[in-house]
Image: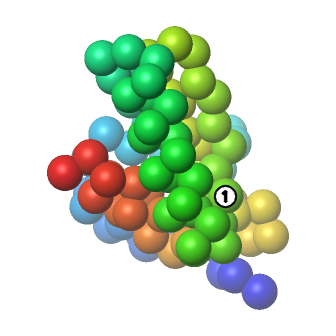
């Protein structure tokens, strides 16, 4: 079973992520992304989907025209885990 991060581990991990915000109510981190148009947003979602499938860890997300919002938490752990941090890092690398 995947372990939920402690408050200290979560704070340390978040310092290494740009733009991701922790929501204590949902126990998740989230980030909104904006793109030039729908095609760019959809292409980004496709790359995220491939990274998520490879990691075996899938985001909660939404898309409206040129924006994509992604929320990450580990349901089995009851909140944020190292798997969420790793996927957030992988998603951020897709933008580099």
- Give the quarter of the figure containing the N terminus: bottom right
| Number of numbered discs on residues | 1
Q: Residue most toward the left? A: 96
Residue 48 image offset from top left, x and y in percent? 50, 52
The answer to whether residue 67 is left or right of residue 4 is left
Task: Please name whichever residue, 11 or 73, is drawn nearer the observer in this view of the structure.
Answer: 73
The quarter of the picture where residue 79 lies is bottom right
Is 89 above or below relative to 35? below
Q: Is residue 32 visible?
A: no
Task: Please name whichever residue, 77 or 91, is drawn nearer the observer in this view of the structure.
Answer: 91
- Label 1 element class: loop
Residue at point 74% right, 71% down?
77
Is 59 above or below relative to 83? above
Residue at point 52% right, 46% down?
46
The quarter of the picture where residue 40 lies is top left
Residue at point 44% right, 70% down?
86
Q: Is residue 36 visible?
A: yes
Count neighbours of disc 1 (C-alpha within 10 A) and say few if under 14, some if 14 to 19, many if 20 or more: many
Residue 7 image offset from top left, x and y in percent? 50, 65
Task: Please name whichever residue, 81 or 62, is drawn nearer the observer in this view of the structure.
Answer: 62
Q: Which residue is mark 1?
A: 58
The answer to whether residue 79 is left or right of residue 49 is right
The answer to whether residue 10 is left or right of residue 55 is left
Residue at point 46% right, 18% down?
38
Residue 88 image offset from top left, x and y in percent? 43, 57
Q: How is the image coloured?
A: rainbow
Is 95 above or below relative to 86? above
């Amino acid at each position: 079973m995947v372990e939920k991060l402690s408050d200290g581990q979560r704070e340390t991990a978040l310092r290494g992520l740009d733009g991701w915000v922790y929501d204590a109510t949902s126990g998740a981190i989230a980030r909104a992304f904006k793109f030039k148009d729908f095609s760019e947003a959809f292409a980004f979602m496709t790359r995220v989907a491939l990274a998520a499938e490879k990691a075996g860890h899938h985001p909660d997300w939404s898309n409206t025209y040129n924006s994509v919002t992604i929320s990450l938490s580990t349901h089995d752990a009851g909140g944020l885990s190292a798997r969420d941090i790793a996927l957030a890092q992988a998603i951020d690398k897709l933008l580099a």
